[in-house]
Image: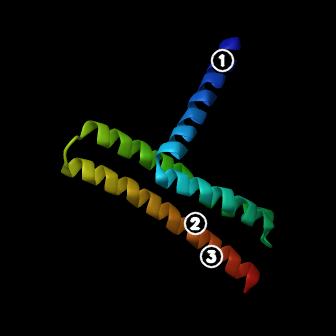
Amino acid sequence: MTWIFKKLYNSTLYSFSGLKTGIAEDQSVRMEAILVLIAVPLALMVEASLSERFWLIFSVLIIFIVELLNTAIEELVDHLFKEIDPIAKKAKDLGSAAVFVGVMHACGVWGTILYKNYL
């Protein structure tokens, strides 16, 4: 039973290491982390139902999650491809597109909820 706690503990350490590395080394991850730090308290302050607040917070967390995954893809691609390569470009473009879709989703969620509650 103690091995389960040890594995959970180690997994948590690896996760925090990844967050620390992403925030320290990547401007996009840092920017999305700041977005989360601003948007979560704001979501708790706006006039909204509990479920609406959940969606406001969840939508910005999705952006952060996708940005972390995109950064991991970019790091791996940069490591594997030292020169410009069409496959590397495609992988990076798809990761960037995923972040863009997440941002558009969050804009839609925030826009809909704020419009409904304030206009």
- Rendered residue at 47%/48% (across/down): 26
Q: Amino acid at mark 3?
A: Gly
Query: What whole-number distance in Å separates the C-alpha atoms at marks 1 and 2?
Result: 36 Å
Q: Is residue 5 visible?
A: yes
- Outermost bottom residue: 119
- Residue 51 in view in this figure: no
Circle 1 residues within 10 Å: few <14, some 14–19, many ≥20: few
The tag earlier along the polypeptide, 1 or 2, is 1
* Picture quadrant where residue 96 is located: bottom left
Q: How is the image coloured?
A: rainbow
Q: Earlier in the sequence, mark 2 or mark 3?
A: 2
Relative to 22, 94 lies left or right: left
Q: Quadrant of residue 109?
A: bottom right
**Residue position for label 1:** 6
Neighbourhood count class around disc 3 (C-alpha, 10 Å): few under 14, some 14–19, many 20 upward = few
Q: Residue 61: image x %, image y %? A: 61, 54
> At label 1, which amino acid type do we have?
Lys
Amino acid type at mark 2: Ala
Q: Is residue 50 left or right of residue 57?
A: right
Q: Are marks 3 and 1 in contact (CB under 8 Å)?
A: no
Compared to residue 8, the image places residue 34 above or below, namely: below
| Residue drawn at (22%, 48%) of the image | 87
Find numbered disc 2 in the image and state the secondary structure of the residue it sits on: helix
Closer to the chain start, of discs 3 and 1, is 1
Task: Please provide percent x and percent y for residue 19.
Answer: 56, 40
Return the residue at label 3.
111
The residue lying toward the viewer, choosing from 118 and 30, is: 30
The image shows residue 98 at horizontal and vertical percentages of 43, 57
Viewer-closest of 71 and 97: 71
What mark, if any, has residue 106 been given in the picture?
2
Q: Quadrant of the N terminus?
A: top right
